[in-house]
Amino acid sequence: MVKITVNVNDEILNKFIEVVKMKFGEKEGMFEKSIEMAMKRWIDDQNQTEIAERQIALMRKGVGTLNGRKFNREEIYEHLN
């Protein structure tokens, strides 16, 4: 376990503490656990954003090939309708 010191906007910290107390009460260790949960959530969000951006880039380039012929998104939609 690592101990860190950070500077946080007072208003954001007070809102965070209020939400932690509403959710968990004032149980020992809940503030630290909530910080860890928030950090994990942020990491997951960043990973999902990166995955989505890569997929969008692939779609913009055009998707798939069939016998050497490339299809773009518009052509695929035309064949579906």
Image (cartoon, grey):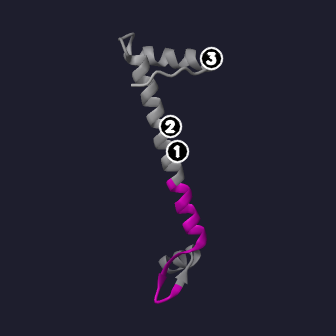
Q: CA distance from mark 2 to mark 1?
A: 6 Å
Q: Which residue is mark 3?
A: 11
Q: CA distance from mark 3 to mark 1?
A: 24 Å
Q: Is residue 40 magenta?
A: no
The dot on residue 74 is: none
How far across and down, in percent of the image, does residue 27 sit? 35, 11
Query: Which contiguous range is marked in magenta?
Result: 51-69
The dot on residue 42 is: 2
Q: Along the polypeptide, which appears first: circle 3 or circle 1?
A: 3
How far across and down, in percent of the image, does residue 76 sit? 52, 77
Q: CA distance from mark 2 to mark 3?
A: 20 Å
Observer-side mark, 2 or 3, equals 2
Question: Are dots 2 and 1 in contact, CB under 8 Å?
Answer: yes
Q: Amino acid at mark 2?
A: Trp
* Residue at x-position 38% and y-position 12%: 25
Give 4 or 68, whichever is nearer the viewer. Answer: 4
* Residue at x-position 43% and y-position 17%: 31
Observer-side mark, 3 or 1, equals 1
Q: Quadrant of the N terminus?
A: top left
Point out the residue furthest to the bottom here: 67
